[in-house]
Image (cartoon, rainbow, N blue to C red):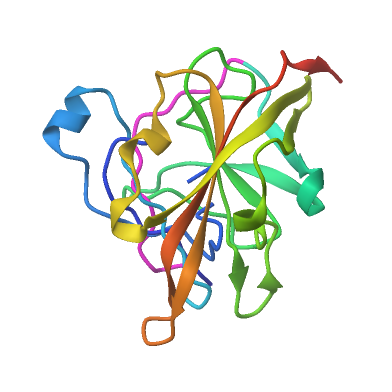
Amino acid sequence: MTWVRQGPLWLVFALSLAISGVGVGQMVDAHLRDAGSVPAALAVSPAVPPAERRAEPPAVSSPPPVAEPTRLSLPALGVDAPVVGVTVGTDGQLGVPDNPAVLGWWRGGAWPAAPRGTVVLDGHVDTREAGPGALFRIASVSPGATVSLRTADGAANYVVQAVRHYPKSALPAEVFDTTGNPRLVLISCGGAFDHATRQYKDNVVVYATPATAATPA
């Protein structure tokens, strides 16, 4: 399975989403930490075992003030996937659901429809055992596509603004930003596949901004 590997530190999705897993990078520079950023770099490779290094977000997290997301819908790609909460493990790395059909929501980041910060979702792009994951075609999504993140209280709707590819070692710290304008980020792996390391060389990051206020269930 593929894990997302971390690059820069202060969280700017990241899917880990040719994500087969989330990979660990080095911690963010001191000046980034001072700026209030979150760790970074979710790098994924479809054949890397769960023990592979993953992302390394901040260890501090608190219960969200609203209902957690339970499902993500991205009609343009035919995606309707369950979402589960993930946290930072004792190894300091961000968890990713083993099942590539399931996405992980970072509990240390923003919650759906939060007035500030980034809602971060990650997931495997594929795995050797299960094949394509929910974010398998995430790199092909176009700006303007709608994304709905459902909770027990309703749904938070977003509109895709941009799709970016970054080397695994250079995932921007802003991907995990917890204090900036509200948005949704999906992280996964992509780019060329290195058959020697059995990893994708890039991370694919989809940025989306709120479409409207949360709608009633």
Q: Is residue 30 above or below residue 81?
A: above
What is the span of residues highlighted in magenta in the rendered image?
Answer: 50-65
Residue pictured at 82% horizontal, 53% vertical: 78
Q: Is residue 50 above or below residue 154?
A: below
Whether residue 20 can be seen here = yes
Q: Residue furthest front?
A: 143
Residue 62 horizontal/vertical position (percent): 46, 23
Q: Position of residue 204 (x, y in %)?
A: 50, 54
Q: Is residue 64 magenta?
A: yes
Q: From the top left corner, tell me how far across and down residue 160 is, in percent.
A: 64, 36
Locate the C terminus by quadrant. top right
Residue at horizontal 18 percent and vertical 24 percent from the top: 34
Is 212 within the magenta?
A: no
Quarter-wise, where is residue 30 in the image? top left
Name the residue rendered at 35%, 59% in the picture: 167
Question: Observer-nearest residue: 195 or 81?
Answer: 195
